Amino acid sequence: MSRAFTKEDADGPEPRYSLPPRDNPAYDSAAAWALIEGANVGDSFSAQRATGYRWGEPVLKPYVERILEQAKRENNERLQQLAERFLRCGITTP
């Protein structure tokens, strides 16, 4: 196979997410940011695995709403787009 069609760094290190301990009250806020950051770099899977939450997790929606407000204040269109996409996700809890 031609080298032009291979991604040489495909097996590189996964992104690291700075998360407090799970019992820390700030964990959910940090997890929301991690999921947004993961989506921004195209690696939602690693962010979901690191946080233990899925994209669109209802418990995180209040935190993502705050991220959306910040994105609007800062005119950060990409962050706004990701936050809005998260909030539209229709995950239901069993």
Image: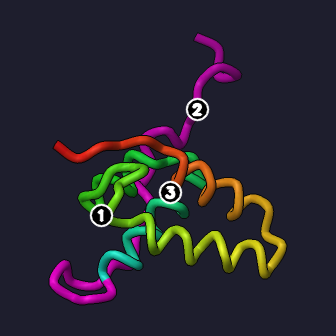
Q: Main secondary structure of the magenta part?
A: loop
Dot 3 crowding, Cα within 10 Å, few <14, some 14–19, many 20+: many
| Mark number displayed over residue 38 | 3
> Please, which residue is most extreme toward the right here?
75
Q: Is residue 70 left or right of residue 93?
A: right
Q: At label 1, which amino acid type do we have?
A: Thr
Q: Could you tell me which residue is drawn at 78 percent across and 81 percent down?
A: 73
Quarter holding residue 66:
bottom right
Q: At label 2, which amino acid type do we have?
A: Lys
Which span is picked out in magenta?
Answer: 1-26
Q: How many marks?
A: 3
Q: Is residue 46 left or right of residue 43?
A: left
Give the label, 1 or 2, closer to the camera. Answer: 1
Residue 32 sits inside the magenta stretch: no
Give the image location of residue 91, x and y in percent.
35, 43
Q: CA distance from mark 2 to mark 3?
A: 19 Å
| Mark number displayed over residue 7 | 2
The quarter of the rendered structure image containing the C terminus is top left
Observer-nearest residue: 22 or 8? 22
| Residue indicated by mark 1 | 51
Dot 1 crowding, Cα within 10 Å, few <14, some 14–19, many 20+: some
> Please, which residue is most extreme toward the bottom here?
25
Q: Could you tell me which residue is drawn at 55 percent across and 70 percent down?
A: 65
Give the image location of residue 19, x and y in percent.
33, 78
Q: Secondary structure at mark 2?
A: loop
Q: Is residue 21 left or right of residue 61?
A: left
Give the image location of residue 41, x and y in percent.
59, 53
